[in-house]
Image: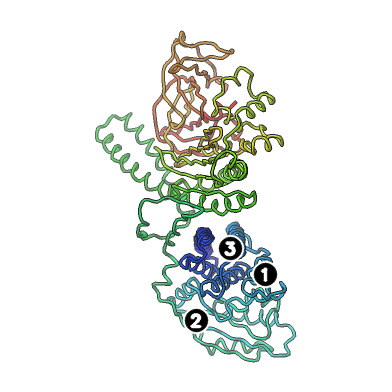
Amino acid sequence: MDLNEYLGLFLDESIEHLQAINSSLLIFEQRLDDEAVIDQIFRSAHTLKGMSGTMGYDAIADLTHEMESALDLVRSKTQPATPELIDVLFVAAEQLETMVEDISQGGTGKLDVTTTVIRLKQFIDPDTESGKDTVKAAGTVMMNFECDVYSESVVRQSMASGYQAYVITVELSADVILKAARVYMVFDRLQNLGDVILSNPTSDELEQEQFETRFDVLFVTMKTAEDIQQEIKAVSEVAQVLIQPFEVSVEPAAAATLLEPVEETPAVNTSIETSTETQTPIAAKTIRVNLERIDRLMNLFEEFIIDRGRLERIAAEVGSSDLTETVERIKRGTNELQSLVLTLRMMPIEQVFNRFPRMVRSVSKDVGKNIKLHITGAETELDRTVIDEIGDPLVHLIRNAVDHGIESKADRISAGKPVEGNLSLRAYHSGNRVFIEIEDDGAGINQERVTKIALEKGLLTEEEATLLTPEEAAMLLFAPGFSTAETVTDLSGRGVGLDVVKSKIESLGGEVFVETKRGEGTIFRISLPLTLSIISAMLVKLDQETYAIPLTAIIETTSLKQDVILQAHREKVFDFRGQLVPLISLNQVYGLPHVEADAYSVVVVRSGEKLAGLMVSELIGQQEIVMKPLGSYLEGIRAISGATILGDGQVALIIDSNALLRK
């Protein structure tokens, strides 16, 4: 057996248990006597210890072992929980996340956790004086082969395939000189007979000779105990070999829970609040599927969508009613299939939101504030690609809200507000988009200060400054280079790096808006597409070339005669519902010949608060398209976000209206 086969399962399970630990720690901090919460943290730490030991990630196993030991004292009421214990458990959880993240990126998962282990050990045994003893103790994990559910599942699968499981105890001679070399020789012979599941001490400790003369091995093989004993005794300086059958003590049903969805952690309702209107439903039957398979399925379906477009074009040209009817049936079926395939790529945004409670706790503690985080809509689903990318922008916005947006205790008291500040994180669906809101009840954004800095930097004129609304002033914070050291102080940090946040969100096909009211707070609202791969678009002609404009950016299409096109500030504009909107000639943008006409087809698009009319040669119609990235050779083309293959085999470039309106 190759343990690498279990790496994906290990990572999935580890992430779920770490999420459970984080959520439960926040409740534990508020309710130190909540036995159910303590049990939840203990069980998750215990399972992590076993899984990491099985996989050979000893730093994780050592740290979770000490967490488990400390929590066991609290469970048994031998020692009361203390604020110091809570703090070190939060630190341990953060270190565990770091190690698991490193493993997921191909690393070894090693991290110096000595200080944290010492702090935990000092809680377990207040008489502990040196880190040396602690580290040594941390290496004695699983001395009695307490086999966790994960390890037993490996053994069960082996036994189901005809393997036998044994615990092998090897005693080396008392006068052995090169212990590590003898251990290596024993393991080398064992690898020729079967597979080592666990060792005690761990492989690293054996290699560093951190043991006396005895070590234990959990081993699966097709060979008999006599064969194993004969092989090991052939190694020089092996004094004794004891082989015992390994008994699987956990019921099969319990072991099988490893492959079942982890039950959702209870919502945090103290310093962290999540809203729920219904009870948690019974978990549906699920299986784990490698993400690469889903991506491959998605790629195949995208090709099918392209072929469907070709078939629709052929049916229209042939004019056969039977063929047209068949194509319509295929279209209905593929529409339903498309919904199912896209659903496979959807993941709850909870995976991103789960990191914020601990972060808010840490940052608010550092700056000396009391802040209550309210989370709603964590079950809202987004495309996996968006989930992977949206985390960093949200971290930035939330840190700014905690660190700078919400006032200090003294300022809140002076303003007649409660000492405890409120930060809300919401997610919800609306149409074919997902909205994420970060709202604080802080001082709001100082419009006068923002406007003054914008004037100093030449971002707007005096006349424009007098017409700014609070929301328009707030959007200036997203201008590149807006922030300065002085801005960080006087603007309470608003604007630090927000141009990067905006760029990242727009690269995902999203938009960001700001609402603020002086003295009452600020809302950052992010709008994101449900999926990035298959989108609805308006096909247009520019000269003889076909282009696509995503429907999510379009307000409406219209036709403009020459006599309604006006000039303002040397630009063409037109009256759109009482508002002068600039006209942009796409032919001019992309270097195509401009043809004068009595009337022009115009696509009215929006980006944030900005509107523009895009002049095109011809409107073709709406169509679902498969969005493909541009190659590196074409990446520099202005206002082009990708390309698609049409039903007739043509390649159409996809217009990025956000980039067109960005000035």
Residue at 49% x, 61% y is 20
Residue 634 screen position, x and y as percent: 59, 34
| Cα distance between the residues tagged 1 and 3 | 15 Å
Residue at 52% x, 31% y is 656
Badge count: 3
Residue 142 screen position, x and y as percent: 57, 77
Q: Quick one: label 2 or label 3, which is nearer the N terminus? A: 3
| Cα distance between the residues tagged 2 and 1 | 36 Å
Height in image: 36 above or below 435? Answer: below
Looking at the picture, tell me which residue is in the foreground, 486 or 317.
Answer: 486
Label for residue 86? 3
Q: Is residue 188 left or right of residue 430?
A: right
Residue at 63% x, 63% y is 108
Say which element carries label 1. Answer: helix
Q: Which residue is mark 2?
A: 165
Is residue 179 shown to the viewer in this render?
Answer: yes
Height in image: 305 above or below 660? Answer: below
Label for residue 118? 1
